[in-house]
Amino acid sequence: MKITAIHSTSVPIASEIRNAFIDFSRMTASVVAVVTDIKKNGKRVIGYGFNSNGRYAQAGLLSERFIPRLMQADSTSLLNDAGTNLDPHRIWACMMANEKPGGHGERSVAVGVVDIAVWDAVAKIEGKPLYRLLAERYNGGKVDDKVFVYAAGGYYYPGKNVKALQDEMRKYLDLGYSVVKMKIGGESLADDLKRIEAVIKIVGSPDRLAVDANGRFDLKTAIEYAKAFESYGLFWYEEAGDPLDFQLQAELANHYDKPMATGENLFSMQDARNLIRYGGMRPDRDWLQFDCALSYGLVEYMRTLAMLRENGWSPRRCIPHGGHQMSLNIAAGLGLGGNESYPDVFQPFGGFADGTPVENGQVPMPQVPGVGFEAKANLYKVMKALV
């Protein structure tokens, strides 16, 4: 068997929403299709992948470096020992050949997109949902049939007042979510506290609300917000400062003993390890949000999970950023703590299989081979147009 073609395109996911740091008016994403010569049920096996929101499409890196490396490689060098399926680890090594260490920025996004597509193809060739394949290979066969998900929203939007924010959060509860998240840091502390208290009235308890500053604050401001939050007992306080300012994160922990979360903008095992070493993160209460679609894919994510175990962290403290089906499969197959969800934004990439109910804050896993993109009609329409 072999890879016969790899196609990529850039897709707009623009909207008028903003967080405390960026707006999404020109946001794009890369979509990749890895075509194989294998047929299942009369159809050619094609693996698909895309990158999470917040990082732009990687057309240049994909077309100039990573796709050519795979297509120019000896096809047998990309297979498992039996020659019956693709080997994601060998494919990852091929993509990263002649790449210097460090520089985990946009490169990690491009590699991650292809890596997701490869895993999708691998699971389809074996005729299994990806989460079940992962559980069998790496988790002793243990699968979470349902995964905790929280509804991420609460973005700043032109003309959006407190009532509109409350209506949005009420909708998420009606959809079955038990925990919601909103943005902070885009207005004054006083205004943000009014927004937070308005949402708490809707969700009923502060521990059902997470807040996200998207790296906006300096240390002084981060501590001011932390002191204001202390009496609430929020689900978590997310990414207060720059994601690479580990000293800020560590000092903030001295002023806030409630749960914090960060990691969505760390794109390698090495950066994740530095957070654990120097960021003051506490394995008994804090949450890690590394996103495989932005950080070199699942091959690198498994290295990150191994590093976490070596440092006394449970995979259950990981709830990936991104709100997509790939992270949902990883959560179910490798025993993570849950997954983000975007009920309203970043369509068609946000959300899960069509008709998948959210009940008591959990979603059941579909019985669809691969990642399950084909079970999300509006997303699959975009993907299959590539081939």
Image (cartoon, rainbow, N blue to C red):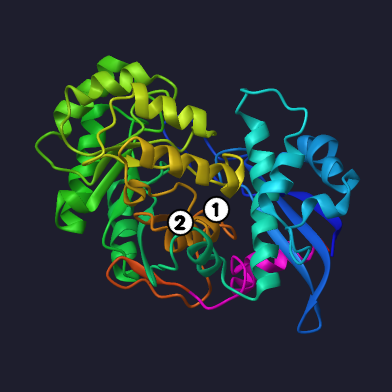
Quarter of the picture containing the N terminus is bottom right
The tag on residue 211 is none
Is residue 380 found inside the magenta-colored segment of the image? Answer: yes
Residue 147: x %, y % from top left: 37, 65
**Dot 1: what SS?**
loop
Name the residue rendered at 62%, 68% in the picture.
370
Q: Residues within 10 Å of mark 1 (few under 14, many from 20)?
A: many
* Amino acid type, residue under disc 2 in the picture: Tyr
Q: Is residue 158 visible?
A: no
Numbered mark located on residue 346 in the image: 1
Q: Is residue 329 above or below residue 296?
A: below
In the rendered structure, which segment of residues is drawn in magenta?
366-385
Q: Position of residue 39 (x, y in %)?
A: 81, 76
Is 375 magenta? The answer is: yes
Mark 2 and mark 1 residues within 8 Å of each other at the beta carbon? yes
Quick one: quadrant of the C terminus?
Answer: bottom right
> Which residue does the numbered mark 2 point to in the structure image?
342
Amino acid under label 1? Phe
Above or below for 246 versus 301? above
Which of 352 and 217 lies nearest the eye of the viewer?
A: 352
Residue 78 lies left or right of residue 146; in this view the side is right
Horizontal placement of 44 versus 255: left or right? right
Q: Is residue 173 above or below residue 89?
A: below
